[in-house]
Amino acid sequence: MNCTVCGAVIPDGSSVCPMCGANLIQYQQPNQGFNQQPMGGQPMGGYQQTGFNQQPMGGQPMGGYQQTGFNQQPMGGYQQTGFNQQPMGGYQQTGYGQPMGGFRQPAFGMAGGGKFGASPVGGRFTIAKILQLVGAILIFLAPLFNWMSIKVKSDGEKFKEHANMFKLAGDEYLDKGVFVFFGIMILLIGTFLICLELMDFVPSLQPLKQKIVNIPFLEIGIIVLVLLFFILAFFNGDLMDGIKAIKDEIKETNKLAKDYDYVDKIKGHANHGFGPILAWIGVICAAVPRVFRLIGKGNLLGE
């Protein structure tokens, strides 16, 4: 063996160098074993290199399990996103109380949609949402109310006739089956619009609503379609002629009553009834918020 101080060749197992007199026991370099602390207590390898609460290399861990110990400022690994730690990325980036998206993102209160005048998904109550819901309900009810209303009183006798879209289709009135078609289509559209608004209250249905409203101009197109049905029903020739005939009869009778004492005056009215009023108001309420979004003025209605 060689002396660890002067390098002289000496017998194996010597404890003192015969050349320089150095104590060889304190300079011996044992193998890196368990709990060995070479070079002033700085571990070079083995199990203790990464022991609990060990601060190798001036307190900056280089690797191993303890590199990311408790309350330690890690550079990476699992503890990078530990409790109360400021993570750089990974799972805790969207942890409790810091939602960036995904599950922790509240369903009701996060608005989406709005393209092509489409309704936002979720979100708070706004003037626009209230108008759309009211409009959808009025559209649904419109064909169920009177589209012909006649009320006449003459010489103590009263004559009344009221008919919604479905009654107008019967042979007792106009015998026009087209009113049944108008009524069914309007009811379906009204139901669709109501369901579209109620989906905001059911988180599981919000993804479906998002897909629906993403179809370009779908909602506006549906409202234009229902408006067309209302116009065709309102200006139906047979309906207009029937109402006009009753008005003319009332007018002529009252003119005769003015000229001749034996003719009784007639009091009353003949018109389209309450159904068309609901129809026009419903279409306006449903259309205005969507048109405002389409032209970029949705903020005027609280969006």
Image (cartoon, rainbow, N blue to C red):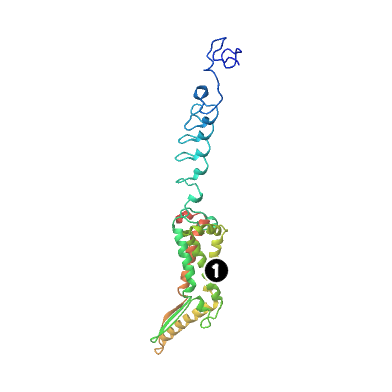
Which residue is tagged 1?
228
Residue closest to the far bottom: 262
Q: Is residue 201 among the parts visible in the rendering? A: yes
Residue 14 picture quarter: top right
In this view, 41 is above or below 218: above
Q: Amino acid at mark 1?
A: Leu
Residue at image point 50% right, 35% down: 68
**Measured from the top left, where is residue 192 in percent x and y?**
52, 65
Q: Quadrant of the N terminus?
A: top right
Return the residue nearer the eye: 12 or 295.
12
Q: Circle 1 — which element?
A: helix
Q: Nearer the viewer, residue 6 or 71?
A: 6
State the residue at coordinates (48%, 71%). 142
Give 209 or 257, whichever is nearer the viewer: 209
Q: Residue furthest top?
A: 19
- Pinpoint residue 77: horizontal percent, then vertical percent: 53, 38
* 23 relative to 255 in the view: left or right: right
Percent of width and height locating residue 136 = 48, 65
Residue 198 versus residue 238 in the image, above or below: above
- 97 above or below 303? above
